[in-house]
Image: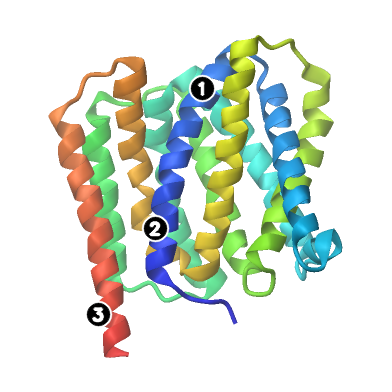
């Protein structure tokens, strides 16, 4: 039986959105200067070394972490995540950070819509309303009236589909596989797939960019570790409104690091997204009390 703790799950998903926003900014810089396949490969080398070291120190060691009840789904998860990272880095370079997120942020709606038929989770009309309101907040932030009119807009849409499937598979395998097992498979499978591709695209990297690469590696490990644990202890559909916060942090990073101007629509949209998330938390607390 998987431990259920919605508040901790929400805290983890919020922390994940902060980490992923930072990671996106670093990824955009590195992918603009170096081959994407090499960047992802180095990131996964670090990821795999980390999970191997952690697993070796746990009771049962690496054999225990390797023993998955869903090995095929775990492999699919790892491969999907590598592919999704390739897709998103391509989009960051060709479409930009903000426009990429404008399309990609539809992934929580995909997760919520599929969590019922795939995971058997109950998604009531109030939760659907909160997710929809959160999506409207994202639209206010991004002002889509300006339009993302580009063939590249389909690229982050593909990334959104891939990440939604990854999130659902993460929740599904958590029913029998612990977070430690999923974390191990995410790192090792990703390392294998990324190396098979990236080893053919090696480029020399400057000293400063090696520091950025190291930071990217740390954020990758921290972000996906928290994401796996969040879906292990809370329903996927309940966490989705909080995933919109990644747009908030992304906007802040864009203004701080890339000189974007603070706009009133960002403040209003952020308030709408936060309100939708808080409503979901309040509603879930009420249902727990009534139950």
Residue beneath the point at 36% across and 19% down: 257
- Residue, far right: 63
Q: Position of residue 283 (x, y in %)?
A: 25, 73
- The residue wearing badge 3 is 286
* Relative to 251, residue 116 above or below: below
Residue beneath the point at 67% across and 39% down: 82
Q: Nearer the viewer, residue 54 or 289?
A: 54
- Residue, far front: 57
Is residue 162 among what the camera can see?
no
Left or right: residue 39 compared with residue 103: right
Is residue 281 among what the camera can see?
yes
Q: Secondary structure at mark 1?
A: helix
Q: Secondary structure at mark 3?
A: helix
Q: How dense is the environment of label 2, judged by Cα within 10 Å: few (below 14), some, or many (20 and up)?
A: some
Q: Nearer the viewer, residue 129 or 47?
A: 47
- Alpha-carbon distance for marks 3 and 1? 42 Å
Q: Position of residue 78 (x, y in %)?
A: 70, 49
Q: Nearer the viewer, residue 222 or 82?
A: 222
* Relative to 58, residue 259 above or below: above
Q: Secondary structure at mark 2?
A: helix
Q: How dense is the environment of label 3, judged by Cα within 10 Å: few (below 14), some, or many (20 and up)?
A: few
- Alpha-carbon distance for marks 2 and 3? 18 Å
Asked where in the image residue 59 lies, by quadrant, the reply is: bottom right
- The residue wearing badge 2 is 11
Which of marks 2 and 1 precedes in the sequence?
2
- Alpha-carbon distance for marks 1 and 2? 26 Å
- The residue wearing badge 1 is 28
Quadrant where the N terminus is found in the figure: bottom right
Left or right: residue 266 compared with residue 22: left
């Amino acid at each position: 039986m998987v431990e259920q703790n919605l508040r901790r799950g929400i805290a983890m998903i919020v922390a994940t959105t902060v980490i992923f926003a930072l990671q996106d900014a670093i990824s955009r810089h590195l992918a603009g200067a170096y081959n994407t396949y090499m960047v992802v490969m180095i990131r996964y080398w670090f990821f795999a070394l980390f999970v191997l070291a952690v697993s070796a120190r746990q009771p049962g060691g690496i054999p225990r972490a390797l023993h998955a009840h869903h090995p095929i789904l775990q492999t699919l998860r790892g491969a999907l995540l590598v592919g999704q990272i390739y897709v998103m880095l391509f989009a960051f370079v060709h479409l930009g950070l903000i426009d990429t997120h404008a399309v990609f942020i539809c992934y929580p709606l995909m997760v919520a819509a599929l969590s019922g038929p795939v995971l058997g989770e109950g998604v009531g009309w109030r939760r659907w309303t909160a997710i929809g309101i959160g999506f409207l907040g994202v639209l206010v932030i991004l002002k889509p009236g300006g339009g993302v009119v580009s063939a590249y807009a389909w690229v982050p849409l593909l990334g959104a589909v891939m990440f939604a499937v990854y999130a659902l598979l993460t929740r599904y395998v958590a029913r029998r596989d612990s977070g430690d097992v999923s974390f191990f498979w995410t790192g090792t499978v990703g390392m294998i797939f990324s190396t098979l591709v990236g080893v053919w695209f090696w480029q020399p990297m400057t000293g400063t960019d090696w520091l950025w690469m190291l930071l990217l590696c740390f954020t990758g490990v921290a972000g996906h570790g928290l994401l796996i644990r969040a879906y292990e202890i809370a329903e996927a559909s309940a966490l989705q409104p909080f995933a919109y916060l990644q747009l908030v942090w992304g906007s802040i990073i864009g203004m701080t690091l890339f000189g974007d101007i603070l706009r009133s629509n960002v403040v209003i949209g952020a308030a709408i997204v936060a309100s939708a998330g808080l409503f979901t938390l309040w509603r879930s607390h009420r249902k727990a009390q009534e139950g």
